[in-house]
Image (spheres, rainbow, N blue to C red):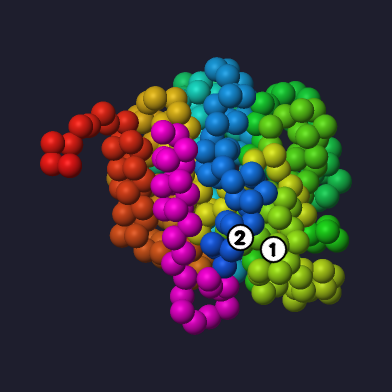
Amino acid sequence: MPQVIGEYIDRLCTVEMRPGKGNLPRGVIHRLYDAAREQAGGVPLTLNMAQAIVDRVKPGDAVFILTGAGGPPVLPNAEVDGLLGAAALARALHFALGARPYILTEERAAEPVRAACWGAGLNVRRDGGDETAHQVTFVSTPEDDDASRSQASELLDRLAPTLVLGIEKLSPNRSGVIHGATGLDYTAVHSNPRYLFDGARERGILTAGIGDGGNECGFGVVEEAVRQIMPAGDKCDCPCGNGSAANVATDKFVVGAISNWGGYGVSAMVCFLNGDLAPLIEADDLERMLRDVVGSGAFDGGTGRPTISDDGVPLSGQRAFIEMLRSIVTIGQIDLASPGH
């Protein structure tokens, strides 16, 4: 049964909705997904990741969720994609598995992260702040490379997480340059996530990545495929000339048409495997999260404006996604002998 549900969720998460004209790559998600699915041994990607998380994460464990794409000047407080998925994952991992979620991103996204978590029904504190019930801890990550390296080591040693997961977290390429999906250089305004993932691997910590553009942490497992599939994958628009393809690989990886959708899909699979769907967000939760995140300063990465949408897909489409996702896992739990068949 989990295999079938994983297939359904993967198919839903990879329904691509992108403009017919413009600079955003179109018709690529299924190709990226196929490459990642083959690398995973043919197992549905959301199931592959969720099962590993359920097997590894225990009550009281710290889990790190890295997010926060985009940056000034076009996206001064980060983009919507990644933030909602991070909050949805934090909710599922906390209420389903008893984990203690930490969301790590640049300081500019502090208010959007708080808004996303509040919309998901979670309290928020800063690292080192007063403890409270059902909390997510926000950790501000530095943009300086040396500071990123130092912080990564300190956090991994102090908190000893059992999971380090990136969702829409931009990865450096093989030259160490961090790009947007179309090849723009974002290195100067991003923390370097490589140190957290490399440090986690050295310590035997489970790593996971969720992405949609070939430039996010996790896509390193299919880097050569990204270089062939994505227009900017092999050659970017910055002086490095070495492409936008991510070089950071993870143990488990999910491709979604929108990274948030991949996050919702993994959350649903975790809840399904755990036998309790209550921690999965509902459409009303998502609408509140989206409105609050945009109100706190995040922009839709597709439009570059404070529109109530995510990667160009409007609120109606976002609500429909959650309704269909919840239907998949809810119906999947029913024992029914149909009298009409």
Which residue occupies the extreme bottom position in the image? 21
Q: CA distance from mark 1 to mark 2?
A: 7 Å
Q: What SS does tag 2 mark?
A: helix
Residue type (three-letter) at the residue carrying disc 2:
Leu
Determine which residue is flagged by label 1: 226
User: Who's the residue at 74% across and 58% down the image?
Assistant: 223
Residue 243 in view (yes/no): yes
8 in relation to 308, above or below: above
User: Who's the residue at 46% across and 79% down the image?
Assistant: 20
Q: Which mark is residue 66?
A: none
Q: Is residue 287 left or right of residue 337?
A: right
The part of the chain drawn in magenta is 1-27
Instruction: Choose between 253 and 59: the one closer to the eye.
Output: 253
341 in relation to 314, above or below: above
Graded by Cα atoms within 10 Å as few (under 14), some (14 to 19) or many (20 or more), the crowding at tag 1 reads many
Asked if disc 1 and disc 2 are in contact, CB closer than 8 Å, the reply is yes
Q: Which quadrant of the figure contains the C terminus?
A: top left
Residue 290 percent location from the top left of the image? 40, 52
| Residue 35 image-quadrant placement | bottom right
